Image (spheres, helix red, strand yellow):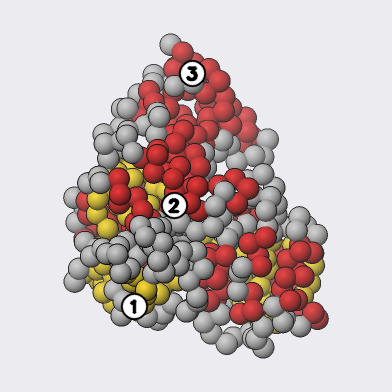
């Protein structure tokens, strides 16, 4: 009875939240957990195939791609598609998809989990698989240094009976291999090209002996083909990208099958590869995986494209140095004139430590095709200072004070536009951009 009341109350809270203009992604979980603290466990135990996606970058896209694949294969599946990945948001997703009777009519569930929340979540769920995308420095005030974060994740996974699907190209992720669980790896062939080259900034040293790792190839961040004299090395992946084409549309080959991806961003090939590895381990056929990719539409601010009068406006979440570097290298691949808006907040869910901007390669912006760099958010002035130190002409840097100003400015100065908000700015910018374009299109 308590569970039924919790579900009903959570559903009502979601309806009220959305009615008054909020997104309703967390409040149902907050309300339901007040009534039935173990509700997540009660509901999750009913799902036959539960997959958790964790890691620093790519959780939401990987989760949504995998869910799209499973739907294409005819599976009953739900996931926390909006990216609410703390225990309240995850509970809210279960509440949303549960019947008031307390039953969950789905066979598959794909849940992205915040790295710091993993230990709390796995006390209530028993996943069939856990996928780890990568580890990068992110929100140091929340996660601490990477060593602390990885130890926390390892301790959470240690007592569990689950299969691990790991990014073998990331030596930091490979530390989870010490857990000696049933493990499969994914990665990219060292001959795959298209990544902008950077120095390794996250992990230069072997986790086993402390000596500096040697790299045959680096894709981005610390991801690549590494080895150490002590024997620690990149594993041979079961799922590996052999060829990659970044022409008009992204295509790549894994184990002799070519997939096509309808979303931009070379980093999204890693996300797609993680989804492929998990789908194949669930017995999904290549044709259904391809169908799932082709039916996928980015609608959550991860390389999401809007268009107004033929001008593209591309929105992408960026929240740490690795994400900023790979995003900038992607959007700067051509020499067409462009404007870039970066929105940097330091609110609770962003992490209050914004020192990471000094590790990001904003020097990439110092080129003639970048016409304007708009800086906004609660730390707009810090961001503008960093970009000025990157060598960008001060006359190109504009500081704006509201989301409306950012969107209005970009629309009023039509050219290829990239908007790069961090977490708390993402949804407001996405909604305002969509709304403004709809209004202007209707008025026209």
First-in-chain label (2 vs 3): 3
Instruction: Tell me the quadrant of the picture where the N terminus can be found.
Output: top left
> In the rendered view, would you say 371 is above or below 168?
below
How far from the left and from the top, in percent, is residue 155? 40, 39
**Mark toward the viewer: 2 or 3:** 2
Q: Label 1 near label 2: C-beta < 8 Å? A: no
Mark 1 → mark 3, Cα distance in angstroms: 52 Å
Crowding near pointer 1: few (<14 within 10 Å), some, many (20+)? few
How far from the left and from the top, in percent, is residue 339? 67, 76
Residue 320 visible to the viewer: yes
Q: Is residue 91 left or right of residue 404?
A: left
First-in-chain label (1 vs 3): 3
**Mark toward the viewer: 2 or 1:** 1
Q: What residue is pinned by disc 3?
A: 36
Q: What residue is pinned by disc 1?
A: 216
**Mark toward the viewer: 1 or 3:** 1
How far from the left and from the top, in percent, is residue 341? 68, 68
How far from the left and from the top, in percent, is residue 160? 31, 35
Closer-to-camera residue (27/363): 363
> In the rendered view, would you say 330 is above or below 170?
below
First-in-chain label (2 vs 1): 2
Residue 436 visible to the viewer: no
Q: What residue is pinned by disc 2?
A: 55
Q: Residue at x 69, y 50 (%)?
A: 352
Classify mark 3: helix, strand or loop: loop
Classify mark 2: helix, strand or loop: loop
Mark 2 → mark 1, Cα distance in angstroms: 24 Å
Classify mark 1: helix, strand or loop: strand
Q: Is residue 197 left or right of residue 131?
A: right
């Amino acid at each position: 009875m308590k569970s039924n009341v919790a579900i009903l109350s959570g559903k009502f809270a979601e309806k009220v939240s959305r009615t008054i203009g909020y997104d309703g992604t967390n409040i149902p979980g907050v309300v339901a957990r007040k009534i039935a603290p173990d509700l997540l466990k009660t509901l999750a135990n009913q799902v036959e195939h539960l997959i958790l996606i964790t890691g620093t970058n790519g959780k939401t896209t990987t989760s949504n791609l995998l869910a799209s694949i499973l739907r294409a294969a005819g599976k009953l599946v739900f996931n926390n598609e909006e990216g609410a990945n703390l225990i309240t948001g995850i509970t809210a997703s279960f509440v949303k998809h549960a019947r008031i009777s307390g039953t969950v009519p789905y066979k598959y569930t794909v849940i992205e989990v915040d790295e710091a929340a993993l230990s709390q979540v796995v006390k209530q769920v028993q996943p069939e698989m856990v996928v780890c995308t990568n580890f990068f420095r992110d929100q140091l005030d929340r996660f601490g240094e990477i060593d602390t974060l990885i130890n926390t994740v390892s301790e959470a996974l240690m007592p569990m009976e689950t299969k691990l699907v790991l990014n073998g190209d990331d030596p930091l992720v490979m530390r989870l291999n010490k857990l000696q669980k049933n493990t499969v790896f994914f990665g990219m062939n060292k001959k795959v090209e298209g990544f902008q080259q950077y120095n390794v900034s996250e992990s230069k040293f072997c986790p086993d002996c402390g000596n500096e790792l040697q790299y045959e190839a680096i894709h981005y961040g610390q991801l690549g083909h590494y080895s150490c004299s002590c024997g620690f090395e990149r594993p041979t992946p079961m799922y590996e990208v052999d060829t990659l084409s970044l022409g008009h549309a992204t295509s790549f080959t894994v184990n002799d099958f070519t997939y096509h991806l309808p979303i931009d961003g070379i980093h999204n090939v890693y996300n797609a590869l993680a989804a492929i590895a998990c789908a194949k381990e669930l017995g999904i056929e290549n044709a259904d995986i391809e169908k799932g990719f082709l039916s996928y539409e980015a609608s959550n601010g991860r390389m999401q494209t809007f268009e107004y009068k033929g001008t593209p406006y591309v929105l992408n979440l960026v929240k740490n140095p690795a994400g900023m570097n790979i995003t900038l290298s992607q959007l700067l691949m051509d020499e067409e004139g462009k404007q870039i808006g970066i929105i940097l907040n330091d609110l609770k869910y962003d992490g209050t430590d914004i020192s990471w901007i000094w590790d990001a390669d904003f020097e990439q912006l110092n080129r003639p095709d970048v016409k304007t760099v708009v800086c906004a958010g609660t730390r707009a002035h810090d961001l503008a200072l960093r970009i000025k130190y990157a060598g960008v002409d001060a006359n190109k840097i504009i500081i704006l004070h509201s989301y409306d100003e950012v969107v209005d400015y970009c629309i009023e100065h039509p050219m290829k536009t990239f908007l790069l908000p961090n977490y708390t700015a993402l949804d407001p910018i996405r909604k305002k951009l969509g709304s403004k374009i709809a209004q202007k299109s209707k008025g026209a």
